[in-house]
Image: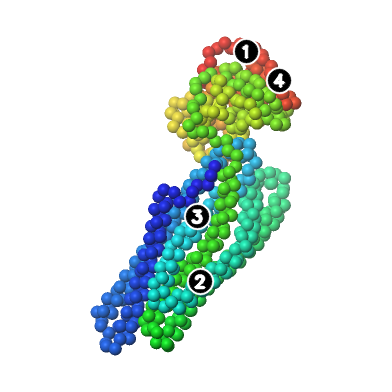
Amino acid sequence: MKMPRLLAGRQRLVLARLLANGVAQALCAIGLATLIRTVVDHVLLGAAAPDVSLLAGEIGGGFACVAILAVLRRRERIDREMLAQTHAHRLRRALYARLNATPVADLVGMRRGGVLLRFLGDLTAITQWVSMGLARLGVASLTIVITLAVLAFKSPLLVLTVGVVLVAGTAATFAMGRWMDGTVDRARNRRAIVANNITEQLSALPVVRAFGQGTREEKRLLKQSRGLRGALIDRSRAIGSINAVADATGTVATLSALLVGILAVAGGQATPGSVIALTTLTGMLATPSRDLGKVYEYWRRARASQRKIASFLAGVSSQRDENAPALAAGQGKLELRGLGIPGVIADLDVVAEPGSHVALTGAAGTGKSLLIRIAAGLAAPTSGHVLLDEQDIASCNVESLRAAIGVVSSDLPLLRGTLASNLRYAWPDAPDREVDRILPISGVDALVRQLPAGLDTPITEGGRNLSVGQRQRVTLARALLRHPRLLLVDDSDAASDAEFRGLLLRLLADFRGTIIMVTQDPVLLTAVDTHWQLLDGRLEVTRQPRRDRDRKIVSI
């Protein structure tokens, strides 16, 4: 996945408007300087008494220029933010698409703090660069160039002096670049360490308390925090030095213009009004010149962020083609053909017939959960194919695949929202009758009666405000809502609750699709018709009779 282009579509129009704004600001500044010269030379210092009406008109014109400048700068700020936020929106969309396309196995190994930094810290740095850096660079450069071009007609020596000061300030700013690069990288790394620790602590705090390790974890965080504090202070030193050079450049340019003007008046080469006007105009360049100094800061920070985002977007993707054909209707026949998983299994060939109920067993670490994820299309095998009703699921679009396969797993937690929104997550527009249908099948009907708010009960992240058994029932209902033809159950706690075991037994008796269930429970093992056992990288298949073997195959 590639980085979205910065200037595309309407963004180019916004940039053109910004550049036109820079020209307009320069013209307003020149107009204001001209009015100042007229007022000083012809009205205030003229031989005759000042013309009150002329003076009022000139002052009114000056206020009009100031007002127009204020409006232009307001418009500039809005357009800069519009340009930046449009790009940030496109980047955020690309980041989420990349995250959504990341293989499930890779998601498990991702550091959540680092991912958050991509969405928050890195996007902020790039947004600042586009708004306060790139866009401001265009406006400020045009303002300075046009203004200096006009000044060149009046006083070439003044333009030469101011130009030398600006070039020297810019060169000094760039000379600090390597220093700033190092401090920015260190601050980023330290922030990532702290962010990863905090996100881990949020989920692991019960473990920390259970084993009495709060003091140790606090010391570790404080050590990381001290490192981050030092890195941020060092970065501020670098940024402060660059900003100081930029501020000094603008001030020195103004003072230099004043000195050249005084010498010109003393030599009879300029009038006081011209000097005041040119000095004012030069002073008005101080703000854009300071902006140019800060542009370098934003660019350096954004460059590091762009590298991180580009690296994230370039990762391995399991995204399917949106134009891929939909999975055709079928009865739930699952085939694993030539399936290979390094270190787990090799060249696996097995078939789950339509309507069969399979128990998948094996010692810990033999690959049961991985096999379930591959069968669900949530992970890709190294070799081989997964077929559902004789169609390769890798070549089918996601929507049809998710409708055909229901998954119950402790790795697929509940989400923050209401009980109803979690039940409907796979089918947000599900009719009430469909929700009512799955409530007794999954045992959620009893849960709804226990909760004062019923289906409107708020669910916290991961469903932590529900018991394990209650979460199991909700995840089962969520998986059954769309009438899947293949149901995959991978929950290590599935048989720890006697009531939930009863629900699974009833499901095995009534479900008209294909079920593959990871379980070691002897009661559930006797209720299935096929037993898959993973042993030393191979799969042993045992079939046992079932009285309702010849029933019609339909989805529950």
The residue singled out by tag 4 in the image is 540
Are the residues flagged by discs 3 and 4 in contact, CB closer than 8 Å? no
The residue singled out by tag 2 in the image is 166
* Identity, as a three-letter code, of the amino acid under mark 3: Thr
| Res. 480 in view | no
Which residue: 54% across, 42% down? 1
Instruction: Look at the numbered disc 3 and give the secondary structure of its residue.
Output: helix
Residue 550 image position (x, y, % from top left)? 57, 11
Q: Is residue 133 left or right of residue 214?
A: left
* Identity, as a three-letter code, of the amino acid under mark 2: Leu
- Distance of label 2 from label 3 (alpha carbons): 26 Å
- Closer to the camera: disc 3 or disc 4? 3
| First-in-chain label (2 vs 1) | 2
| First-in-chain label (3 vs 4) | 3
Foreground pick, 439 / 257: 257
The residue singled out by tag 1 in the image is 546
